[in-house]
Image: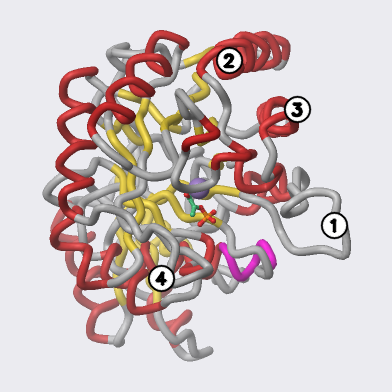
Amino acid sequence: MIVVMQSGADAATIDHVIERIEQLGMKPHVSRGQFRTIIGAIGDETDALLPQLQSLPGVESVVPIMKPYKLASREFHPDQSQFVIGGVRVGGPGCVAIAGPCAVENETTVFTVGRAVKAAGATMLRGGAYKPRTSPYSFQGLGEEGLKILRAAGDELGMPVVSEVMDPRQVPVAVKYVDVLQMGARNMQNFNLLSEVGQTTRPVLLKRRPSASVKEWLMSAEYILAQGNKQVLLCERGIKTFETSVRYTFDVSAVPVAKRESHLPVFVDPSHAAGERDLVAALALAGIAAGADGFIVEVHDCPEKAMCDGPQALTPDMFKDMIAQCKAVASAIGRSWELPGAKPSAKPLAWGGA
Ligand code: PEP
Ligand code: MN
């Protein structure tokens, strides 16, 4: 439920409502606006609760949230959420490019690719240290060693870094090195892992599972938000359909649907959807045109030698061309582009009283 406080409600009145929400077995999520405070009361909603909250002093109205995803919904938070991650604004007017190798293979590759993608206009650096591979005999990633390399490259290049965690036990290690924790598509419904990353202060890039509906994807975001972590970035990366000409079917309609349903920034990953490099730019352009707040793509200086996902890795030159095209599309729809090392122009919108 959403408890809308009267515009003049003072701190003590608001605290009393928060206390009452807790006594009723619900979790309060406070959003202090310029003119009024809104409190999300999240938990098991029964019919008796509404009149009880409605009768408290200072309460203007109580509105049930109809969607099963409460904190992720636009009903709860009508304004677009924006976060500043290491100086890069996400969810604002500027689109954001995250790029880098699929896996952290060695220091040379990460630094070489990092320099190239930064020069071309990427604002964040990606690289997997824990790799979810179909075969247990394939390269599984360098683990903590890989995270150290990625951090060193991010620090040298002035780029926030993004890396995947696959297991709750990896989370305390990863938070020491990464700016954004990536939840891989296969783990979208690993509820223990979602709760674990929800307890950190790191933004989370939540990939959509190939077999998940948009509703299930948003319910997974809800798991993270319910733990108190408000910085969730949704990422469409292709779904399973009957089509076999591409690795996954890039669900471009998921972008405007997710943006309509949720206030969270929406990213696209055209690399894992396409599965082959020649298709990546077209899907990225479609994603930006559809309203995505940015993309995450795989780039390798020598794709044929890549230890993971080589066929879909862009060369640095292809990435440079793609960025130029994406900037043109962004500008055609009234969006700008977050530049490497750019300082955000204003404070991000905060919710939950943070
Ligand atoms: C990745 O980003 O390298 C990755 C494994 O992605 P996904 O979880 O979308 O397959
Ligand atoms: Mn990959």
Q: In the image, is 232 to the left or to the right of 350?
A: right
Q: Bin the neighbour count of mark 1 within 10 Å (Cα to Cα): few under 14, some 14-19, many 20 and up.
A: few
Q: Which residue is mark 4?
A: 223
Please, what secondary structure does the residue beneath circle 3 have? helix
For the residues labelled 2 and 3, the Cα–Cα distance comes to 11 Å
Q: Mark 3 or mark 2, which is nearer the start of the sequence? A: 3
The residue beneath circle 1 is 244
In the image: residue 69, left or right of residue 34: right
Which marked residue is nearer to the observer: mark 4 or mark 1?
Answer: 1
- Give the residue displayed 30% in from the left and 86% down from the top: 24
Marks 2, 1: nearer the viewer:
1
Q: Is mark 2 within 8 Å of ligand 1?
A: no
Residue depth check, mark 4 versus mark 2: number of the one nearer the observer: 2
Is residue 62 visible in the rendered image? The answer is no
**C-alpha distance separating marks 3 and 1:** 18 Å
- Give the magenta-colored segment's residue range: 213-217
Q: Tag 4: residue type?
A: Tyr
Q: Is residue 310 above or below residue 331?
A: below
Question: Does the segment drawn in magenta span residue 214?
Answer: yes
> Would you name the residue on which mark 3 appears?
282
The reply to whether the C-beta atoms of the residues labelled 2 and 3 are less than 8 Å apart is: no
56 vs 81, nearest the viewer: 81
Which residue was labeled with disc 2? 323
